Image: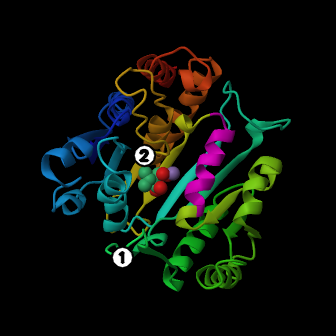
Amino acid sequence: MTKTYKLAVIPGDGIGKEVIDAGMKVLLHMEKQSKGAFVFESDYFDWGSDYYLKHGRMIPESGVDQLINYDAIYFGAVGDRRVPDHVSLWGLRIAICQGLDQWANIRPVEFLPGIPHRLVHPNPESLNWILVRENSEGEYSGIGGRNFSARPDEREVAIQSSVFTEYGCERIIRFAFELARTRTRKKVTSVTKSNAQQYGMVLWDEVFTRVSKDYPDIETDQWLVDAMAARFVLHPEDLDVVVASNLFADILSDLGSALAGSLGIASSANLQVDKRFPSMFESVHGSAPDIAGQGIANPIGTIASAGLLLDDLGLHDEAAKLNQAIRQTTSEGVVTRDIGGTYTTEEVTNSIIKNLST
Ligand code: IPM
Ligand code: MN
């Protein structure tokens, strides 16, 4: 019997359209290869900054509700010079992540063969760590406001509060431990800044200590975020699962993917771990308006995110095959400009498809 997976596809802004085209081409090729085992039924949503300029919102009022009955959401990128960044981000990506309670964002850091990386390390391909980002609260809670703008002499005041709940900390920390159990290294490193953030992040630390007692088989470690940034560069071999707050993991994921060679290769999954709603899969990079429309964007981050999507649908063999095909392509040197290559988005995509067949 053919299994049908319903995909909500949101290309978004800038290079989002190009990299989503690439990812969908790969997924449809895999559908064909499955010989009727599974098919994707995809609906495209034209949400993003163009939509905003026409309708005054990034997604329709019922937007989040429209996504509920899909098996997965495949997302390109958001960001456009004509729309303030905080409007486009809160109106689209964050509206979906928080609206569908996709509370765990995983971001693997992998050193692919053939890609020049930025670490001084004897065997970078042996490195493999994964960031677990708290994706529902923390510094992205959106609590605060601006006031006193009518006062003279630029005396406006802005308050931006972080929210750390014991519930939110516990579920993401437990998720990190469960994830570590599935990995060879079996280690969780928690990242905070609890020396300076003495309320929310001390609560996080306390929850980490409490939850870790349920996982005596997992090694633990705790670092402040500044020291962790240095550790990414100096001792990456110490890292396995790294769990951090919304903002800290956001920053560390750019550092991790830059060290691995390019933001263009980093994949990410916003998981609704409890499966109450669909999860959303997207690359870590932004909409790169400077190169949009030229056909030179690196499709690997978005194609690798399709791998995370396949995994989430239970298609584990297909996900592993796709990762292998990506590695084969990078080791053949078929890469885009951001990593020193000369190939186009389409050529890299076709090479991955070719390597899926061998
Ligand atoms: C990311 C991005 C987003 C974030 C922006 C676009 C809101 O930087 O996914 O890493 O900060 O979450
Ligand atoms: Mn980011």
Q: Position of residue 46 (x, y in %)?
A: 20, 42
Q: Position of residue 29 (x, y in %)?
A: 36, 27
Q: Residue at x 65, y 47 (%)?
A: 255
Q: Residue at x 45, y 35 (%)?
A: 303
Please, is residue 358 above or below residue 11 in the view?
A: above
Q: Which of the two discs, 1 and 2, sits closer to the camera?
A: 1
Q: Nearer the viewer, residue 163 or 117?
A: 163
Any part of residue 199 in sight = yes
In what element is the residue under mark 2? strand
Please, is residue 75 above or below residue 20 in the view?
A: below
Question: Which range is magenta?
Answer: 248-261
Marking on residue 151: 1
Q: Residue at x 54, y 14 (%)?
A: 342
Image-quadrant location for residue 11: top left
Any part of residue 4 in sight = no
Marking on residue 94: none
Quote the CA–CA distance across marks 1 and 2: 43 Å
Can you tell me whether the CB of the residue at mark 2 lies under 8 Å from the nearest atom of ligand 1? Answer: yes
Please, is residue 342 above or below residue 237 in the view?
A: above
Which residue of the protein is positioned furthest toward the top in this rendering? 342
Q: Position of residue 283 (x, y in %)?
A: 46, 43
Question: Does 332 lie within the magenta span?
Answer: no
Determine which residue is flagged by label 2. Answer: 282
Question: Does 249 lie within the magenta span?
Answer: yes
